Amino acid sequence: MSRSRHEPSYSVIHTMRPRRYATDASGIAETFADGSPIIVDLSMMQEADVRRLIDFMSGLVKGLDGTIRRVAVKVFMLTPAGIEQFDDELDQNSLQPSHDEELLA
């Protein structure tokens, strides 16, 4: 997919449904490194690959100053630096789970 020079990379949110860590992790990394937000649905993966990919995505967003948030069971939103995720259902004054608890819950 090609973008115009004036169109920001975040004007497109990619949805990815990986099946295997070995074949699909690099595509997630390339898309995220290009500055695009990604929704990753892990429901088609086996549990061992799910854990590996969550660890991989956590490192990816940490290295690129982005964020990762679980939005549903086995569904995660990866957001590049400079784009804020906001969930209007979360009370900003409440206690929130730690990063690891949130991802693995």
Image (cartoon, rainbow, N blue to C red):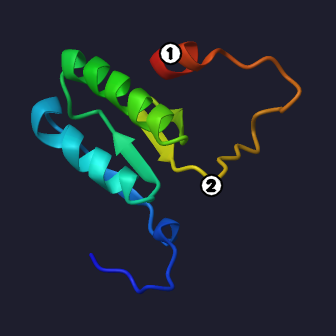
If you read the primary sequence from the N terminus, does the residue marked by circle 2 or circle 1 appear first? 2
Q: Amino acid at mark 1?
A: Ala
The local crowd at label 2, few if under 14, some if 14 to 19, many if 20 or more residues have their Cα within 10 Å, is: few
Q: Which residue is mark 1?
A: 105
Vertical comparison of 73 with 15: above or below: above
Q: Amino acid at mark 2?
A: Ile
Vertical comparison of 1 with 102: above or below: below
- Residue 4 vs residue 76, the one in the foreground: 4
Q: Residue at x 30, y 34 (%)?
A: 42
Q: Residue at x 49, y 32 (%)?
A: 62
Residue 36: x %, y % from top left: 44, 59
Q: CA distance from mark 2 to mark 1?
A: 24 Å
Residue 89: x %, y % from top left: 75, 39
The local crowd at label 1, few if under 14, some if 14 to 19, many if 20 or more residues have their Cα within 10 Å, is: few
Judged left or right of residue 30, residue 98 is right
Tag 2–tag 1 contact (CB < 8 Å): no
Judged left or right of residue 56, residue 36 is right
Q: Is residue 74 among the parts visible in the rendering?
A: no
- Residue 13 vs residue 28, the one in the foreground: 28
Residue 88: x %, y % from top left: 76, 45
Q: Residue at x 83, y 32 (%)?
A: 91
Where's the N terminus, which quadrant?
bottom left
Residue 93: x %, y % from top left: 89, 27
Vertical comparison of 83 with 99: above or below: below
Judged left or right of residue 103, residue 99 is right
User: Where is residue 82, by image quadrant?
Assistant: bottom right
User: What is the secondary structure assignment of the residue under circle 1?
Assistant: loop
User: What is the secondary structure assignment of the residue under circle 2?
Assistant: loop
Q: Residue at x 41, y 86 (%)?
A: 4
- Residue 95 vs residue 23, the one in the foreground: 23
Q: Which residue is mark 2?
A: 83
